[in-house]
Image: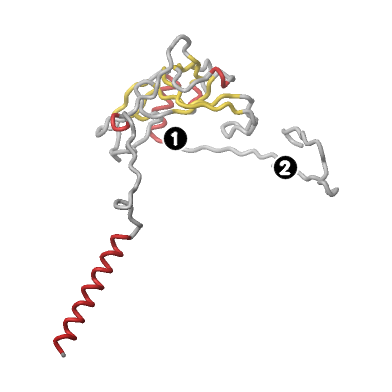
Amino acid sequence: MGIYTDKRKSTTTPDGYELLMHESGHLEYDFGWHMGPYWSKYLNEMRDNGRFMGVKCPECGMVYIPPRKACAKCYKEMNEWVECGPEGILKGFTVVRFPYIDPNNGHLMKVPFTAVWINLDGSDTRMMHFCDELDEMKLEVGMRMKAKWAKKPRPTSIHAVDHFEIIKGEPIVEEVLPERLKGPIKMELPTKKTAKRPGAKAAAAKKKAAAKKAAAKKKVAAKKK
C-alpha cells in the first residue's frame, strides 16, 4: 500500500468485486530554476542577515512581501527596498492533517502542521509560512506573531525562518477598513420606476426609431393622395 495505511473496513464492493486502489509509484527528480533578482535578494537577506525586505511602489506606496517587480495596482516598476517585520499579524490559518509529498525535498510531510498567512509589520501583503501552534482553538485571526529564525537555515528558501509563534500578552488586532467601507451600507431595492430590464434602453431607442420611420412613411403617403 506504499506510504499510506489502508483503513477500509471492506475490501469488496456490495456485489462482490474487489475494491482496487491505484498507487502513485515512486518518483525521484532533480530540479533547479533561477530565482531572479527580486527573490534572490529577498532570500539572501533572510538567510544571511535575518531580516525581511520588501519592495515599495513609487506611485501608491504599497509594500510587497514577498517582493515583485511591478505593483499590482499601479503597474509601476518597484526598486525601493524597505525592511519589514519580523513581527506581524495573523491573517489566516489552517491545520493540515492529511500527509502529502513535500515538493521541496521529496519527503513525506509530517502532520499535523499549521500553515499561516502573516501580514508583516510595514508590509501591505501577506506571506505564507508555518506556525508552531497545532491547536486551531488557540489561534485567532488578528493575533500578533513573530518569526523564529532557524538554527540551520535551508539555503535558497523561505525556511531561513523555522516558523512563526504567537506573541503572548498582545491584544487581538481588529481589521481596519478603508474609509469608503466604514459606516452602514446603504442598499436600495429597485422599484417599478427604477427597475429596468437589461437592454431596455436600446429597445426603447429602437421602438422610437421605428415609430419615427412609420410616421415619415405615413406623411409621404398622405402627400401622394
Foreground residue among 129 and 204: 204
Foreground residue among 86 and 26: 86
- Which marked residue is nearer to the observer: mark 2 or mark 1? 2
Q: How is the image coloured?
A: secondary structure
Q: Residue at image x 25%, y 32%?
A: 58
Residue 35 image offset from top left, x and y in percent? 44, 35
Q: Residue at image x 28%, y 38%?
A: 76
Residue 156 image offset from top left, x and y in percent? 48, 28
**Vertical position of residue 207 compared to residue 10: above or below:** below
Residue 7 image offset from top left, x and y in percent? 77, 33
Question: Tag on residue 35?
Answer: 1
What element does badge 2 sit on? loop
Ranked by sequence position, the earlier of labels 2 and 1 is 2
Q: Residue furthest left?
A: 223
Residue type at numbered disc 1: Met
Residues packed near mark 1 inside 10 Å, few (<14), some (14 to 19) or many (20 plus):
few
Task: Answer with left or right where residue 13 lies relative to residue 208.
Answer: right
Q: CA gap, disc 2 to disc 1? A: 33 Å
Residue 216 image offset from top left, x and y in percent? 18, 78
Residue that carries the numbered disc 2 in the rendered image: 23
